[in-house]
Image (spheres, rainbow, N blue to C red):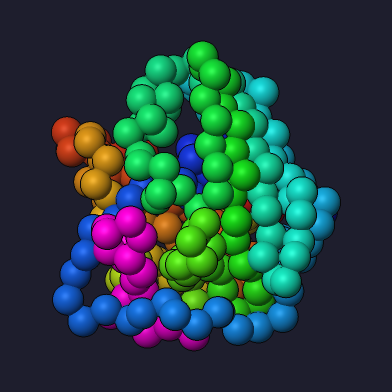
Amino acid sequence: MKTRINTLFLLSFFVFALVSCDSLVSDSEDIGGSQSEFGELGHEIDFGPIQGISNSNVFVSDLEDGVSTYTCSATATNSTYIDLLESVPEELIPGTVSITGNSVEANINMKVTDEGAQLIFNGGEKLTLINYSAKVGDKYSTKVGGVTLENEVTEKSTEDDFYWGGMYIKVIKVKAKSTVPGISDVILIYNHKFGLVGADVYFEDGSVKYIGIFC
């Protein structure tokens, strides 16, 4: 099965470094649950078109002890994407990123289960992206390279109220505060069955990039 996803969100896996807040939940434990098909070895991600990016390719190249490695490559014809990646300190990337001219290659480490998803950093630190049993106000954090990274659950549907894929579904929205110049916040939108279904990127100039993600 291929997942159709917008390229900009994939970049957000390793672009958006987050800032600290009070009342944090430490991600010292692995997220529970059974292995998700989205993290299985060989699983491919099929991108929809996006202006400024071409030749995108992502697939799960390794699965070891429940951690999936997503091998990613793309050509950025919009230099903004390159500038964003180059502004992120190496220690804040959960894997590796190599930039040659306008070509980007990356290996991103994640644990993906039927209970949620968690980034795994090179030093062993973990940052939960989503836990499907979360409550509004829950915050997940970890410290990497002296920087505290955080995700906060801001909304959780009690009924099918989010239109996606020709139907209405329940969603959980998670806010990530960015320290990348030009970007203020990122809202990631998840569904317990379909995983990531959307993302909103808020820029400091007041503009918003709405991203639809489809399986």
In the image, taking residue 48 as reference, residue 182 lies left or right, namely: left
Apparent side of residue 154 relative to residue 167 in the rendered image (left or right): left
Magenta stretch encompasses residue 148: yes
Q: Residue at x 60, y 84 (%)?
A: 32
Percent x, y for residue 165? Answer: 62, 55
User: Which one is nearer the viewer's eye here, 162 or 111?
Assistant: 111
Residue beneath the point at 27% across and 58% down: 147
Compared to 1, does 4 lie above or below?
above
Q: Is residue 210 visible?
A: no
Q: Considering only vertical position in the picture, is 212 above or below 7?
A: below
Query: Residue 23: horizontal and vertical position, in percent?
Result: 21, 81
Instruction: Report the number of discs.
Output: 0
User: Between residues 29 and 183, which one lies in front from this camera angle?
Assistant: 29
Quarter of the figure that contains the N terminus:
bottom right
Residue 128 visible at all: yes
Q: Is residue 129 magenta?
A: no
- What residue is drawn where x is 36% and y is 74%? 140
Res 194 → quadrant: bottom right
Q: How far across and down, in percent of the image, does residue 126 sit?
A: 47, 69
Q: Magenta span covers which residues?
A: 132-150
Q: Is residue 45 left or right of residue 142?
A: right
Could you say where residue 67 lies in the image, as x and y percent from the top left?
67, 65
**Residue at (42% x, 25% y) in the render:** 82
Quarter holding residue 114? bottom right
